[in-house]
Image: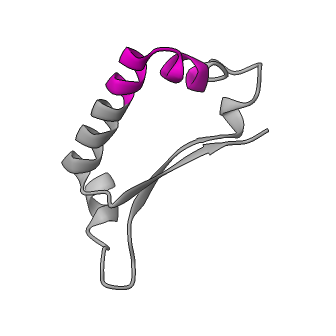
Amino acid sequence: MYTEFTSLQSDSLETWIAIGGFDFSDPDTPTFNAWSDMTSTSANRAAFITSLESFMDQYGFQGVDLGQSF
């Protein structure tokens, strides 16, 4: 469905992927430490960025929203 979504792009509509949100700040979820794990070392940050760029290129996303709810 990602490709279907990104095919909606136009001069007035960009398609972005959002990562994060409430589950990333809830200690009762498996994603609670995701941001800490992704940013804990330069190698982890590089791996995340490389993976994100590849994902965005594969599906045609124009941007990313990195969100953390508190």
| Residue 69 shows up from this direction | yes
The residue nearer to you, when weighing 48 against 9, is 48
**Residue name at image x 66 percent, y 31 percent:** 24
| 17 with respect to 49 (left or right) | right
| Residue 1 shows up from this direction | no
| Percent of width and height locating residue 16 | 42, 59
Q: Is residue 29 above or below residue 54?
A: above
**Residue name at image x 39 percent, y 78 percent:** 13
The residue nearer to you, when weighing 12 against 6, is 12
| Image quadrant in which you'd find residue 6 | bottom left
**Residue name at image x 76 percent, y 19 percent:** 28
Q: Quadrant of the C terminus?
A: top right
The stretch of residues the image draws in magenta is 34-48
Q: Is residue 50 above or below residue 14?
A: above
Asked whether residue 47 is drawn in magenta, I would say yes
| Percent of width and height locating residue 65 | 51, 52
**Residue name at image x 57 percent, y 22 percent:** 34
The residue nearer to you, when weighing 1 against 16, is 16
